[in-house]
Image (cartoon, rainbow, N blue to C red):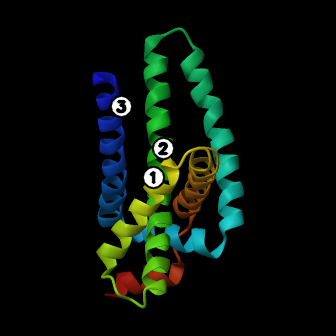
């Protein structure tokens, strides 16, 4: 019985902490999250394929580092994995922002911006725990699209007009 409580409690904590993580990322890196939201909403297929390519490219050094016998290289592998998943989390915050925006649009603008975002993050978290469909479709596809959106945002170049306007101010 205690095992069941531990598993159930762990799932509840994870279910609450994921929307909280996405909200913190949305508040701290609002410009990057908004750019990721735009990339994901405008070109979802491109974001998926870029995410798939980025995950394959990121998996190579991770596998090499994890399979080397030195504990130091395994720690470097974990650091690399955290960096890649951190980038995907910024993209996931963009995906949650898009879900929240569409939810707000469907309810005729009933929610404020933070409320809509938290609802979008909660829906994303709940959809991922749905048995089989969530585990095998929502999590992998959502992660790849999120990573693709984040990679596009990380790789973007600053507009020369934008930097010139900021320098004149």
Q: Earlier in the sequence, mark 3 or mark 2?
A: 3
Cβ atoms at labels 1 and 2 below 8 Å apart: yes
Q: Which residue is mark 1?
A: 89
- List the residue tagged with mark 3: 7
Image spot of residue 8 (x, y percent): 34, 36
Quadrant location of residue 7? Answer: top left
Pick the quarter of the image with the N terminus: top left
Mark earlier in primary sequence (1, 3): 3
Under circle 3, the secondary element is helix
The span from disc 1 to disc 2 (Cα, nearest Å) is 6 Å
Q: Residue at x 55, y 68 (%)?
A: 157
Q: Which residue is mark 2?
A: 85
Say few, some or many: other residues with alpha carbon within 10 Å of mark 3 (under 14 / 14 to 19 / 20 or more): few
Nearer to us of marks 1 and 3 is 3
In the rendered image, the residue lying farthest to the bottom is 108
Label 1 SS: helix
For the point 61% across and 47% down, the residue is 140
Mark 3 vs mark 2, CA separation in Å: 24 Å
Q: Is residue 92 shown to the viewer in this render? A: yes
> Which residue extends farthest top?
69
- Residue 137, position in %: x, y? 64, 50
| Discs 3, 2 touching: Cβ within 8 Å | no
Q: Residues within 10 Å of mark 1 (few under 14, many from 20)?
A: many
- In the depicted structure, whether residue 67 falls above or below residue 101: above
Q: Quadrant of residue 167?
A: bottom left
- Image coordinates for residue 78, horizontal then vertical, percent: 45, 28
Q: Is residue 78 above or below residue 144?
A: above
State which mark lies toward you, 3 or 2: 3
């Amino acid at each position: 019985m205690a095992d069941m409580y531990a598993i159930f409690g762990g799932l509840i904590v994870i279910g609450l902490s994921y929307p909280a993580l996405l909200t913190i990322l949305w508040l701290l890196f609002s410009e990057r999250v908004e750019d990721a939201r735009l990339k994901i909403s405008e070109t979802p297929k491109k974001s998926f394929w870029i995410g798939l390519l980025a995950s394959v490219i990121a998996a190579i050094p991770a596998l090499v580092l994890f399979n080397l016998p030195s504990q130091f290289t395994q720690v470097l592998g974990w650091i690399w994995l955290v960096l890649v998943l951190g980038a995907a989390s910024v993209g996931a915050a963009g995906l949650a922002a898009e879900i929240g925006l569409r939810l707000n649009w469907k309810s005729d603008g009933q929610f404020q911006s933070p409320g809509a975002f938290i609802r979008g993050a909660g829906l994303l978290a709940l959809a991922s725990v749905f048995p089989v469909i969530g585990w095998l479709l929502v999590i992998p596809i959502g992660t790849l699209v999120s990573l693709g959106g984040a990679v596009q945002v990380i790789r973007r170049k600053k507009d020369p007009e934008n930097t010139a306007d900021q320098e004149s101010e």
